[in-house]
Amino acid sequence: MHTLVVLYGHPLDHDAFRRHYRDVHLPLVRNIPGIRAFRQSQRLSSPEGQAPFFALFEADFDDEPAMQEAMTTAEGQLANADIPNFASGGVTVFTYGT
């Protein structure tokens, strides 16, 4: 299993982020071939107060080559290209294997 993680910084407009993410971005993500499961949350918290990130996304793939292949598909490229349309707080992306 290989997991792609996207951490979204706090956007300028939380409501606009939520609307675009729900109505546009997640439908694009659902079309990416090879995703076995995904999780997302916009309810992050921290023991110290506000979490350093606004939202989290994780997508599971069979392995790293499957993830790389999925991200080079037209569907993967469309989802990636959409990120600047709503992520005004920036993104941090990393992967890990289990």
Image: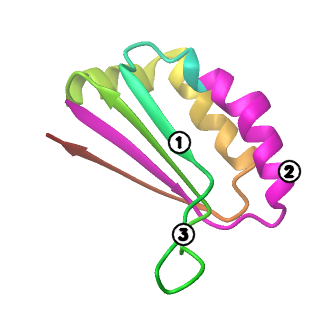
Q: Position of residue 44 (x, y in %)?
A: 55, 62
Q: Position of residue 64 (x, y in %)?
A: 22, 31
- Name the image quarter holding residue 13: bottom right
* Residue under the point 64% across and 23% down: 28
Which is in the foreground here, disc 3 or disc 1? 3
| Relative to 74, residue 81 above or below | below
Helix or strand or loop: what does disc 3 sit on? Answer: loop
Q: Which mark is residue 45?
A: 3
- Name the image quarter holding residue 68: top left
Query: Rounded to the nearest whole Å, what is the CA distance between mark 3 and mark 1?
Result: 14 Å
| Relative to 59, residue 88 above or below | below
Question: Where is mark 1, residue-wise?
Answer: 40
Task: In the displayed orientation, state which residue is furthest to the left.
Answer: 98
Q: Are marks 1 and 2 in contact (CB under 8 Å)?
A: no
Quadrant occupied by the N terminus:
top left
The amino acid pointed to by label 3 is Ser
Marked residue nearer the N-terminal end (1 or 2): 2
Q: Which mark is residue 63?
A: none
Q: Position of residue 63 (x, y in %)?
A: 20, 26
Query: Rounded to the nearest whole Å, what is the CA distance between mark 3 and mark 2?
Result: 20 Å
Q: Nearer the viewer, residue 27 or 47?
A: 47
Task: In the displayed orientation, state which residue is furthest to the front.
Answer: 47
- Name the image quarter holding residue 38: top left
Question: Where is mark 2, residue-wise?
Answer: 16
Q: Which residues are magenta?
A: 1-28
* Residue under the point 85% across and 54% down: 15
**Magenta span includes 40:** no
The amino acid pointed to by label 1 is Gln
Marked residue nearer the N-terminal end (3 or 1): 1
Q: Which class describes the residues within 10 Å of circle 1: few (<14), some (14-19), or many (20+)?
A: some
Which is in the foreground here, disc 3 or disc 2? 3
Marked residue nearer the N-terminal end (3 or 2): 2
